[in-house]
Image (cartoon, rainbow, N blue to C red):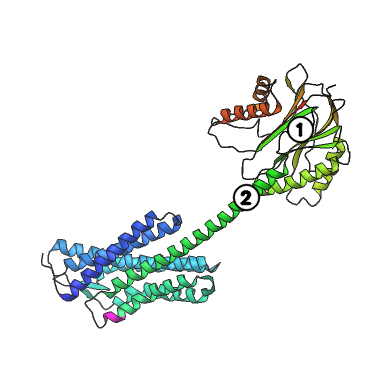
Amino acid sequence: MRIDLSVSNLINVFFIAAGIGICSLSILHVGSGMHIRKEVKKYFQIFFTMINIYISMHFIRMLLENHTGTAVSISIRAVTFIEFFVSGLMIYMLSLLILFIAAPGKNGKLINIIFLVLITVHTLGLLIDQFTDFYYYFDEMNVYHRSRGYAMSNIMHILMLIQNIFLLIRYRNKINKKLASALWLYLLSPLAAIALQLGFQQIQFVILATVISAAYLYFVIIRIQTEKYEDQQKEKDRLDTELSMATRIQAETLPNIFPAFPERDDFNIFASMNPAKEVGGDFYDFFLLDDTHLGIVMADVSGKGVPAALFMMVSKILIQNIAMMGNRPADVLKYVNNQLCTNNHEEMFVTVWYGCLDLETGILEAANAGHEYPVLKKAGGSFEMIKDKHGIVLGAMEGSKYRSYELQMEPGAKLFIYTDGVPEATNSANELFGTERLVHALRMKETGSPKEIINHIDSIVKDFVKDAPQFDDLTMLCLEYKGHID
């Protein structure tokens, strides 16, 4: 096979080799980009592949020219058809990119249809040309020549170019300035290269212009993507810092120093909360209403995360403030419910168990607003679930009423209250921990201190769940009533 080693051909080979190399490296870079959106990856992988095909077909046509034979004739026609067809697809893909970036609203669908019609007409024209030689033809030496209708083969390119220029001008305020400059370069640099080729007809400046402008466009888009990713990371770091602070603030609002009342020997109390997210909606609380009465709260706000944490703070403050006024548990829940129902546009709610223990008599008066059943161990007995009567959750319906009930706690009695994150803890087999396992686990450690009991339950639940993700907050409180020691 004889190869033309003229200066112009050598320059063209260099341009082609450089173009294929740049496009191939770009495809590899796109594939390895960790922070590049999938749609962007897919687009540029196809785009650079098309440019590579376009350049390769042009190169193969160069090699086949000036060689005779039927096989050569068929091959050169095939590669030239592919070259022209892919050139149309390239401008079509660029048009889709500009259309996406410009986002012309309801006109976008119509413009896209126009683009599809143009690429269809372009393809049909190329197919017809295979039988008419209207666009181009090959002589007996298989040398490429333009025909009288060659200009018609560029109609699609020109119309899409005009439409793209219109979009870039009309919607310039929507488009990033760096990106706009890269798009203008890609649209206009081939035109400049064509003008340059008028003086150097044998040198394919268009190939070099296409590759360089495509690589620059890719660089700009990836740079924009990277900057967005970096901004998102900064925002994520800021939110992480704020969430970490919120976690600490939330933890500090709950009683977390134990022993909580070291000067008291008539009761012992311990509690823990492990949120499923950075901040949770569960909360517990305990406080002395006076020297002889202890208030105890266990609650679970609907939802998770920051909204639940904010609602939790409001609920906690309201419950404690109303309880400190000496109201009975049912009245506390009634008043707090009405307050939470006011301006509750997010329709959040909270389940609450609130009890008031008379430290002299051991009488525990309590009320339940849709919360889990408490578990009580009487002196000398075992843990048993107390199926008390539930009222409606707080924040759901203004004017709801609640009913108080009493439990007698003798010295040695223990009370265990919790949120639904404990019985609803789920293992990898999608099996719930359940209340039966909870009661059984409590009985295994019923002689232990409140702290030992809670640590034991926490360990049992973790062993049951194993590697399954934690979907709900785990909150527990255990109270041991000792009574007065003479």
Left or right: 222 with respect to 246?
left
Numbered range of the magenta stretch: 195-201
* Amino acid carrying mark 1 in the image: Pro
Q: Quadrant of the N terminus?
A: bottom left
Q: Quadrant of the C terminus?
A: top right
Q: Out of 453 and 144, give the one closest to the viewer.
A: 453
Q: Secondary structure at mark 2?
A: helix
Left or right: 365 with respect to 385?
right
Q: Which mark is residue 227?
A: none
Residue 80 in the image: x percent, y percent? 25, 66
Q: Residue at horizontal 75%, vertical 43%? A: 349
Left or right: 296 with respect to 241?
right
Answer yes or no: is residue 448 visible. Answer: yes
What residue does disc 2 label? 243
Label 2 to label 1, Cα distance in Å? 32 Å
Q: Which mark is residue 262?
A: 1
Q: Residue at horizontal 83%, vertical 39%? A: 333
Answer yes or no: is residue 419 visible. Answer: no
Residue 477 in the image: x percent, y percent? 72, 32
